[in-house]
Image: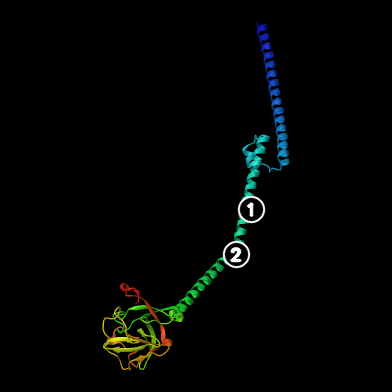
Amino acid sequence: MENQKEKRSQSEGRDTKNLSELLEFDFNQVTDESVEANVSQQSKKGENDQLDSFFVDDMGLPPLPESDAAKHPNLTMSNAFSKAQEVKQKDKTRKQSASKVSAKTQSAEGEAPVSSARRTWNIVKGVLVWSKEIIIALILVWLILTFVAQNSTVYGSSMAPTLENGEMILMNKFIYRISEPQRGDIIVFTYDDPIQGEEYLIKRVIGLPGDTIEILDGIVYINGTAYDESKYLDMSTEISGDISYPFLVPENSYFVMGDNRANSKDSRFSEVGVVSKDQIVGKASIRFWPLDKIGFVQ
């Protein structure tokens, strides 16, 4: 009985030893294999890193940022190449953008003085053009008022009912430079008043140079023939004035009378006399005021 127990104890001791040795062996083996695998993995990783670094540097690409390397410790060579390309492209785009901004800034700085000078010149040119147009307009107005036309206002009633007091007319100052006054024309001429000095009178031409004028029984005779004035005169010429008849109109002179024969200071009176061509300012052509009587003066 004791022998059996001793044998069993010895047998269990051997089993325990064998198991311990087995476990120790397996543990050591596993540990050694793990260490070798770890060393092999680190070695391969180092080779891959060296290869990736060599490949990236050989392609002229920038190294991966440390932040990206930390985020992606297991990047393969192809992934590293793609990531490096992306970084390089971003860097290139940033440089191009910075270059464009710098070029635009330099261009704007260079164009600023030019634009300012051009703007100033445009203003000066506009003022010159505007001044030129004003000068031309003033010259044209002066020429028109001096040689072509001029407005005039009727004062008094000596030409009623054809022209009433206060009506405004446009006087043609050019027509008698190319033609002679005609019978029936309404003219404006200068008159030296003994009291008021020079003034303008407006009358109608009745007698031309060389005509013989005579007034008999309220009718005007020209060269022995009664002159028909019915289209503008509604009264007879009762007042013959203080001159002697028949009256011969001198050369280069005109016999004039107002349409209001009872109230007109004209060639019937020696105070006014005949009107020389040098005294004539122009012909009354158009009435423009009042508006309801706008039209040619007859």
Tell me if I can see residue 147 in this picture: yes
Q: Which mark is residue 222?
A: none
Query: x, y percentage for residue 188?
Result: 38, 83
* Between 272 and 86, the one nearer to me in the picture: 272
Where disc 1 sits, the SS reads helix
For the C terminus, give its image quadrant. Answer: bottom left
For the N terminus, give its image quadrant. Answer: top right
Relative height, residue 63 to residue 290 (above, below): above
For the residue marked with disc 1, what is the amino acid?
A: Ser
* Between 98 and 21, the one nearer to me in the picture: 98
CA separation in Å, label 2 and label 1: 23 Å
Q: How is the image coloured?
A: rainbow
| Residue appearing at x 65%, y 47% in the figure | 92
Question: In the rendered structure, which disc, 2 or 1, sits on the residue that comes first in sequence?
Answer: 1
* Between 138 and 41, the one nearer to me in the picture: 138
For the residue marked with disc 2, what is the amino acid?
A: Val
| Residue appearing at x 63%, y 40% in the figure | 68
For residue 263, what is the image quadrant?
bottom left
Q: Nearer the viewer, mark 2 or mark 1?
A: 2
Tell me if I can see residue 273 in this picture: no
For residue 163, what is the image quadrant?
bottom left
| Residue appearing at x 66%, y 44% in the figure | 88
Where disc 2 sits, the SS reads helix
For residue 65, what is the image quadrant?
top right
Q: Which mark is residue 99?
A: 1
Local packing at callout 1 (Cα closer than 10 Å; few below 14, some 14-19, many 20+) is few
> What residue is pinned by disc 2?
114
Local packing at callout 2 (Cα closer than 10 Å; few below 14, some 14-19, many 20+) is few
